[in-house]
Amino acid sequence: MQEWLPREEILTFEETLRLIRVAAELGVSKVRITGGEPLTRRGVLNLVRGLPKIRGIHDIGLSTNGTLLARDVEPGMTMARSLRDAGVRSVNISLDTLDRQVYSDITGRDLYAQVLEGIAAAIAAGFDQIKLNTVLMRGRNEDQLIPLIEFAAARSLILRFIEMMPVSTTEVLDEDNFMSILEAKRLIESSYRSLIPETEFRTNGPATYYQIPGRQQRIGFIGAMTNLHFCESCNKLRLTCDGKLRPCLGSYLEFDIMKPLRGGASDEELKQFFLGVVDRKPEQHDFRNNYTPGRKMIAIGG
C-alpha cells in the first residue's frame, strides 16, 4: 500500500525552489527530479517551470517509471511534451523487462502498456536525451538483456544496466537475485562480440559506456556493488520531499534542512547548512557493509 505524508510534512514548491536557488548560488548547476514517481505529485509542472528561472541552473532532468508521460495534461499536450516545454532536457525511464507478466510481477502493477506509451511520448516530445534504466535481477530478467538492447536500438535510446542495490527495507541481496554487471557484460558479448569501451563518453551519472560492435549504439553499466571506485566522482546531494538532505544514497546520514528553513533561516544560514552536509559526504557508500536502509528508495530519490 502506498504511504502518503501529510501535506504539512512535505516541502512546498516554493520552499523547494528556494533551497535550489541557495544551492545554485553555491555552484550547483544540475537538478534531477526523481522519486518514487515524481509525476504523481499534484502540480509538478509548476515546480519544473520554476527551475529554469533560477540563475545558474542549466541542466534539468527527470527520472520516472514512464507510466504517466503519455497522459494528456491538456487537449493535445502530453505530460512528456509539457515537461519538455517547461525546461526538462533529459529523461531516465525505468524498464526492467519487455515481458508484461514479468513487469507486473516486479512492480506489482499491470502498467506495462502505459510504460511503452510513455516511452513513445518521450521520443515524440524531443528531449535532448532519453535513457532506459534496467535493474539486473537474477531469476527475473537475465533473458531480457538482448531484447532490451534491440528495443533501445530500434528507438535510438541509451540503455543502462544497473546492479541491484540494497535500497529496499524488505529485500535482501543474495546469489539468487543479484547479477553483476560483469556477468551481464559477458552474456551480452556472447551475442554481440566484445563491447567497445567509450571512455570519453559521459552522462550525469556513474555509468561506464560501451558501443555495440558494428552499430552506433551505446549501452551503459552501473555497478555500485562491484565497482570499488564507484563513489570517486560522486558530487550529488539528495533533497527528500520531507526536507532532508542526504549526502549519499547508500548511507544512513541525512540532515533536516526543513527545520531551519521554516524557522526563519537566512539564505546565508542555509548556505552554511548545505556546506556542512557536503563536508559530511562519505568517501564510500555502505552498500557492501550489510547495509539495511532506514527508508525505502521511493522516500529517498534514486
Image: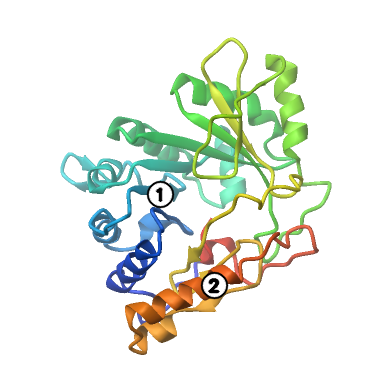
Residue 15 versus residue 226 in the image, above or below: below
**Which quadrant of the structure image shows residue 196?**
top right
**Which quadrant of the structure image shows residue 27?**
bottom left
Q: Amino acid at mark 1?
A: Leu
- Nearer the observer: mark 2 or 1; the answer is 2
Q: Secondary structure at mark 1?
A: strand
Task: Indicate the quadrant containing the C terminus: top left, top right, bottom left or bottom right.
Answer: bottom right
Return the residue at label 1. 62
Return the residue at label 2. 277
Instruction: Name the residue rendered at 65%, 72% in the picture.
Output: 252
Instruction: Name the residue rendered at 29%, 56% in the picture.
Output: 48
Label 1 CA crowd tier, 10 Å (few <14, some 14–19, many 20+): many
- The answer for how far apart the CA atoms under marks 2 and 1 are is 24 Å
Q: Is residue 205 left or right of residue 122?
A: right
Label 2 CA crowd tier, 10 Å (few <14, some 14–19, many 20+): some
Q: Is residue 275 left or right of residue 147?
A: left
Residue 247 versus residue 79 in the image, above or below: below
Q: Is residue 277 left or right of residue 51?
A: right
Residue 98 versus residue 111 in the image, above or below: above
**Which quadrant of the structure image shows residue 98?**
top right
Q: Secondary structure at mark 2?
A: helix
Residue 53 lies, in percent from the top left, at: 23, 57
